[in-house]
Image (cartoon, rainbow, N blue to C red):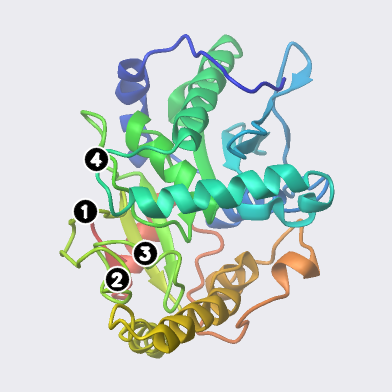
Amino acid sequence: MTGRRILATLGTAALLAAGSAQAASTTPTVTQLLDAANAEYIIGGVPAGMHAFKFLDVPVTYTDPIDGVAASVWVTPQNQLIIAYQGTTGGENIILDPAGAAAQVITDIGIFLADTSAGIRPAAYGDALDFAKLVVSMAATEGYSTANIFVTGHSLGGIEAAYVAQQTGLGGIGFEPTGLSTAPASGTTGTNFVNIVTDGDPVANFCSDLAGEQPFAPPYVAAGGKAPHYGWIVVIGNAADQATLSQDVAKYGDGNVVDAADVLADLVALLLEFHLPGVQAHDLGVTLSPSAAVVDGIGDLNGPVFNAANDTIPQLIQQAASTGKLIQP
């Protein structure tokens, strides 16, 4: 079932009430959530062991050609639902939908502007949220409670997943999302949502609650500021790469055109090195399925491994806390 503009019938209050139970429940694993996020980059991609969620025997998906929101819904072997939002360009899908890829880039620009201008909400946020609400409503007719519905995505998809979690209380993992300038809905705490941030990635570090990309990013404020991440942050990778990011952006804003061009070139290089999902898979000990070299074979695949592949969300939080990789909301 596809659509461009969707009106959901289930209120946010109902989502919040049930979503809060997720923190103590069994959740999908890191591998399952990253597989679902990565499948959105691959033509015909299906996460390992999962099948499409159907309503009236039609797979439930979403595509908006105006703002580039695209998403699929998957059923895990444990009979849980994962709403997976697509990242920028759609990976291989750019071949099938170049206009959608362009719309996603425009949305990215809007998101970066929103992170520094409180109160601005890109249209993609609302569409991603409406789709999640519709999925919850459909799933209820099939016997699924919100305690068994999760969100995920990488990059732009991770940002949309984080926003949906912030507004509904649904749990999940966002891989390399920026911070959010939007306010959480009343009652959401983020205790069941995790942001995976790789040291040195200029996208995930565009936020106010991690020190690394200022002054390009909003001013740093521990656990706050103008654009904090929603939920927990688990930092992976090598701290030296975060120092490199800080050094590269330190030249930003000095009025020197050459320096500004250098910063842009450096950020693009760091993005290619640390942002793509193959890097997160390596650093988390995940063997991606599905996988495509054009998406997953690019970047630094030699970083330190934080083996969280089989962790549920609570286990990921606990392991990260015990190893000093966790930043609490």
Among the two numbered marks 3 and 4 on one chain, the one whose residue lies closer to the N terminus: 4
At 26% from the left and 37% from the top, the residue drawn is 184
Q: Earlier in the sequence, mark 3 or mark 1?
A: 3
Q: Is residue 200 visible?
A: yes
Residue 218 or 31: which is nearer the viewer?
Answer: 218
Query: Residue type at mark 2?
Result: Ser
Q: Earlier in the sequence, mark 4 or mark 2?
A: 4
Instruction: Name the one closer to the observer, 211 or 30.
Output: 211
Q: Which mark is residue 226?
A: 1
State which mark lies toward you, 3 or 4.
3
In the image, residue 42 lies at what x, y percent? 77, 53
Q: CA distance from mark 1 to mark 4?
A: 17 Å
Real-space Cα separation, disc 3 to disc 1, in angstroms: 11 Å
User: Alpha-carbon distance for marks 3 and 2?
Assistant: 26 Å
Residue depicted at 33% across the width and 61% down the height: 233
Residue pictured at 53% horizontal, 82% vertical: 265
